[in-house]
Amino acid sequence: MPPALLTTSLVNTIQIGSLYALMALGITLTFSVMKLPNFAHAEYVTAGAYAALIVSLSGVLNPLVIMIAAFAVGALTALISHLAVFKPLEGRDVSFYTLILSSFAIGLIIRYILFTMADYFNLFDLRIAIPLQILFREGYLILSNLFAWVVPTSIVLVIILTLLLNRSPLGREMRALADNIILARVIGIRVERVKNYTWLLVGGLAGVAGALWGLQTAVHPLMGWGAIISVFAAAILGGLSSFSGTVMGAYVVAFSENTVMLFLNVNYGLDLAFKPAIPFIIIIAVLLLRPQGFTNLIKRAGDLGR
Amino acid sequence: MINIDIGATAVAVLTLFGIYALMAISLNLEYGVAGVPNFGKALFVSIGAYTAGVTYTRLLPLLAGLESIHPCGPSMGAALQLRSEIMATQPAAGFINLALTFALAAAIAGAVGFAVSYVTLRLKEEWFLALVLLVGGETVRILVRGADDLICSNNGISGVAQPFYFLRDPGASSFLFMLLALALALAAYLYSERLVRSPFGRMLKGLRENEDVTRGLGKGISLARAQIMAVGSLIAAIGGVLFALNTGFVNTNDFVVNLTLDVWVMVVLGGIGNNRGALLGALLIAIMDRLAQIGAIILNMGGSEIEFNYVRFIAFGLILLWMLRYRPGGLLPESRLTTEAHEVVKRVIGAAK
């Protein structure tokens, strides 16, 4: 494989993997705290991307303001879907499939509301209006200001989230909920409040991921839905429970979609049209062969280190 | 104002109803009766449609005694003309081809459904099956689209004509096609009613309610699950063949997750576990689909900017949420199954009182 392609694909892997990590952490968090595989997660990403797009079109080009707007809209969308859909179903002994179906339904509603809006205001396939600059060029390695925004922001957010979960009182309460919701209630954790904060956090991260994504590709109502399977693949690689596993999973998925796919394309002539099949194959393989994902590996590595 | 041909609209709605009814009944058998969450309905429907795409381009010319032309690429137009001519002039070849398509689609889908159900045995958690099926459906779609020659990747195959095309009368032809769809739906309904009331059906309901108890009663649950998946999948594939014939196109883009969701909406709306509910759900969705199309035309002629197709999906989402929250049993909830033995016991108790 030519080195130019290799470096480009590795840069893509890091860039896209970071975005997948932001989104997949939300899936893992919702699954462990709320016991819900949330397919509507994709739409928080899209909602955040559109918030960022609209803010940037209105003339505000400060990336920080754009991120905050995306965070707010994503968080709000997530909280609304919790309060309007998931919360009323809780405690009604509904089957797991009712929850999955409901998450599909609310996702469908949000997605096509965004479609209607984009159609009405002609907001299809626009880019967030921050101009592209080349910051660094060394041989084949070209890094743009987008890379400088996307990668550090994602990494910082992932670190903040990890600290929040492991060190802060809120994080402790979330983990308590994930572990045993009845005991959490018994020891006086205000479960509903913690859940609301979790949803805000999950949606906000997804929103920021959407804004960062909108910086590098065009914003479209299907952008979140198009990525949801890759993101689920990352979360499943993390066993839907481990946060470090999920981050690793995100980079593994991005690596196989970019570098591995390109390698197969260049060396074996595999059509790039098969690229979307990669996360699917990862999901099926993991669920069938290793449903715990990376979790045990990480634990074992930790034990060895001790 | 636009003129709406009421007769043609009714035929279109009833044809759609027949096709949707096949899909809804198959999901009802799998999820409603046996509790297998088939989130890959689009996969099994698409097997039927892809089979039709392959037979109408490869098998049909052979049956008519002609050389088949490669359906994709430069010869696309010639191949389309060839199959249209055969369908217009040689009804016998068309009917044999259709019968073989049904048989082939049912056999492939049944085998896939049977095999897929064994995947459950290897899964750690039950709901992973839902995910595997959902993802498997999309994977197959991408692979079929990527395999250029099978059904011409992104272009798809057009001119998959209805079997009564040779009549050269669109009205009569689509009326007869409607009868075919309704007859197949009726057959599937009667069959699944019998199945639900049989001992096998009662065992499936037991499996749905509690796997361990059913196994404890000495029932082979893996085989039962495989059998019901096979039956459901072959019904769905027959629906898929009709789906392709109805639109005249086979295109991978039609078999996305949204199709699966549509079928779920039908079953949830009509009543989970009740075949009559599945029929009602299919009818309501068929009517809504047609109304949405008419609404879109009226809105566009009125110069409205709002795309009605989007409103359709929002409405489907709202229906699903509403039903799941307020009427989880659906419009026609599942009724109690009583057996003859049950009747006897009731009579004896009544006599004793």
Image (cartoon, coloured by chain):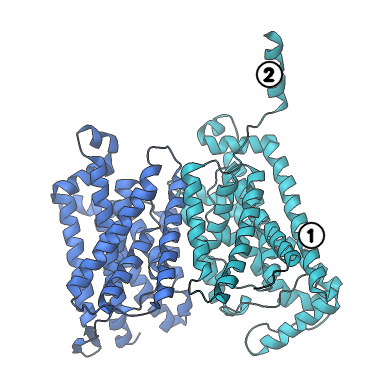
**Residue A4: x percent and y percent?**
30, 87
Determine the image quadrant of residue B247: bottom right
Q: Chain A shown in which color?
A: blue
Identify the amino acid type marked 2.
Answer: Lys
Label 2, label 1: how far apart the Cα atoms are: 42 Å
Seen in the picture, residue B76 relative to B159 is either above or below; the reply is: below
Residue B179 numbered mark, or none: 1
Circle 2/circle 1 CB separation < 8 Å: no
Would residue A147 be found to the left or right of residue A124 on screen? left
Q: Which chain: cyan?
A: B
**On the image, numbered disc 2 is attached to which residue?**
B346
Q: Nearer the viewer, residue B19 or A3?
A: B19
How packed mark 2 is, by other alpha carbons closer than 10 Å (few <14, some 14-19, many 20 or more), is few
Disc 1: host chain: B
Q: Secondary structure at mark 1?
A: helix
**Residue B179: x percent and y percent?**
79, 59
